[in-house]
Image (cartoon, rainbow, N blue to C red):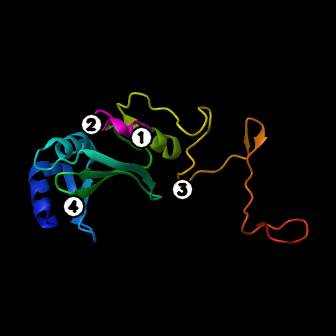
Amino acid sequence: MDPEKLITILTSRLGIAVQSMDAMKNDDLMIVVDKKHLITAAGTLKNDPALGFSTLMNHLGVDYGDSMAVIYNLYSPALKQKVTVKVYLDRDNPEVPSLERAFRGIDWFERETYDLFGIRFIGHGNLKRLLLPEDWDGHPLRKDYVYPALYNGIETARIDMMNETDEAGEPHV
């Protein structure tokens, strides 16, 4: 579908939920949605027969330093079209409604994003760490994260393999 036509349809269907919408280089669309309208927007994108964005391809978190965001990549088999839905979040209180009821496969995506970025998904049925132990302190993909020197008495120091040398002065390979 022509991106301009799709923008017109989405604008009429999503209304005030959309903060901005742009066609990207590959004719896919980027839609920025206000988090308080995310569930309605996702439901419309998925269930509206003229749209049918029923496939969740990916979900991720992003830390921009001064703000955070969650990004959803959706696909409509009927339109053979992709949309990227982005929701900006307050860095001090990064939370957004869970889309678990609309897209059952998002369960582990949301848990991973919570684990690594600390973004809370309100209404998620089992929001707990996925990759790190439950007692891990912090969220390691945040830009302000400080890696701990110890975890349960075990050193966690990392070696910079590109810049460190061995006892003979040779770089690590």
What span is colored magenta in the figure? 100-110
Q: How many marks?
A: 4
Say which residue label 1 marks.
110
Q: CA distance from mark 4 to mark 1?
A: 24 Å
Residue 5 appears in which quarter of the rendering?
Answer: bottom left
Q: CA distance from mark 3 to mark 2?
A: 30 Å
Is 27 placed left or right of 134 in the picture? left
Say which residue label 2 marks.
102
Which amino acid type is shown beneath numbered disc 4?
Met
Residue 23 position, x and y percent, is 22, 66
Q: Nearer the viewer, residue 93 or 170?
A: 170
Q: Vertically, is 12 above or below 166?
A: above
Query: Which numbered disc covers residue 143?
Result: 3
Please tell me which of labels 4 and 3 falls first in the chain: 4
Q: Vertically, is 52 above or below 134?
A: below
Which amino acid type is shown beneath numbered disc 3?
Lys
Q: Secondary structure at mark 3?
A: loop
Please tell me which of labels 2 and 4 falls first in the chain: 4
Instruction: Tell me the chief SS of the magenta region.
Output: helix
Residue at the extreme right = 168
Q: Nearer the viewer, mark 3 or mark 2?
A: 2
The question of residue 101 being in magenta is answered with: yes
Q: Secondary structure at mark 2?
A: loop
Q: Secondary structure at mark 1?
A: helix
The quarter of the image holding the C terminus is: bottom right
Please tell me which of labels 1 and 3 falls first in the chain: 1
Q: CA distance from mark 1 to mark 2?
A: 13 Å
Q: CA distance from mark 1 to mark 3?
A: 19 Å
Which amino acid type is shown beneath numbered disc 2?
Ala
